[in-house]
Amino acid sequence: MITGTTRLIAHLGYPTESFKAPMIYNPYFEREGIDAVVVPMGCRAEDYPDFLKLVFRLSNAHGALVTMPHKVTTTGLVDVLLPTAAIAGACNAVRREADGRLTGEMFDGEGFVRGVLRKGRAIAGKRALVLGAGGVGSAIAASLAKAGVSELGLYDINAAAAEALGARLGRYYPTLGVSLASNDPAGFDIVVNATPLGMKPGDPLPLDIARLDPATFVGEVVMAEEITPFLAAARARGCEVQVGKDMLFEQIPAYLEFFGFPSTTAEDLRNVARLG
């Protein structure tokens, strides 16, 4: 039930047909008696800077979930950009503060990190390799740094992208060890495929599987299929793995906390979701 006191969370992106967040958040809000609603709002890129400001002129606008193609643009539209979003160079959540200022954060990487931790794997003091220095790879690298890894290996076919990500990490985490230019997984405790490889049939694997230690924790961001060829190969090596969709559900409790709502677990959200 939407009433005059309902807090509005705008889900901003274009197009909206593939949006899943309303079918996860709203059943949870309903069950918990939380007077809030997530509403898809399709906004083209050319209209977005003006539209975001208008959304937050609504007295009942509490926050926004931001998806493609607006994540990068949002970093320049908020008043406060938190470190993870600044390192990622992208923002997927905006919260209005009591004084009216807008705070932006990025949760893609937080979802990955929470999934690793909830599987009982340590992150603090470990060595992690992130393949892909685009938006999601940058977000995961930022969240791994926040979680306390001792070293981050960064690799991208565009070497300049990896170098730029390393420089951004260094500004916020000056004691973090950063290595560049290699996709060799040997010696790493955590390896993440944040490249597009695996989205299309016949894609090559992002690294040499023979160099992967069976004790390494391997994660994937591709969601098109649960067990990608990369994860299948890692499992065959004996590695524990995390599928792409885990990152999606694991980040929602972090969003709830960011917006000041009661939180829950990823399992609970999977159970309450009405995804059809």
Image (cartoon, rainbow, N blue to C red):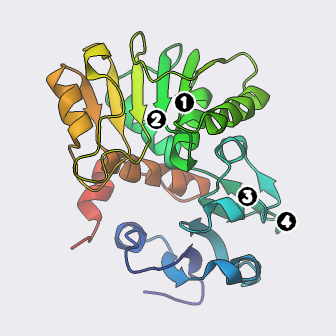
Looking at the image, residue 43 lies above or below residue 208:
below
Q: Where does the image place residue 37, in percent across and percent down from the top left? A: 49, 77
Query: Mark 1 = which residue?
Result: 144
Query: Mark 2 = which residue?
Result: 113
Hey, what amino acid is under mark 1?
A: Leu
Measure the alpha-carbon separation of dots 4 and 1.
31 Å
Q: Which secondary structure lies at badge 4? A: loop
Looking at the image, residue 200 lies above or below residue 5:
above
Measure the alpha-carbon separation of dots 4 and 3.
19 Å
Query: Mark 4 = which residue?
Result: 99
Of the two numbered discs 3 and 1 on the same chain, state the one appearing first in sequence.
3
Q: Residues within 10 Å of mark 3 (few under 14, many from 20)?
A: many
Of the two numbered discs 4 and 3 on the same chain, state the one appearing first in sequence.
3
Q: Which secondary structure lies at badge 2? A: helix
**Is residue 149 visible to us here?**
no
Looking at the image, residue 275 lies above or below residue 139:
below
Tell me the quadrant of the picture where the N terminus can be found. bottom left
Confirm or deny contact between disc 1 and disc 2 (CB under 8 A). Answer: yes
Hey, what amino acid is under mark 2?
A: Val
Confirm or deny contact between disc 3 and disc 1 (CB under 8 A). Answer: no
Of the two numbered discs 1 and 2 on the same chain, state the one appearing first in sequence.
2
Left or right, residue 125 beside residue 81: left
Residue closest to the far left: 236
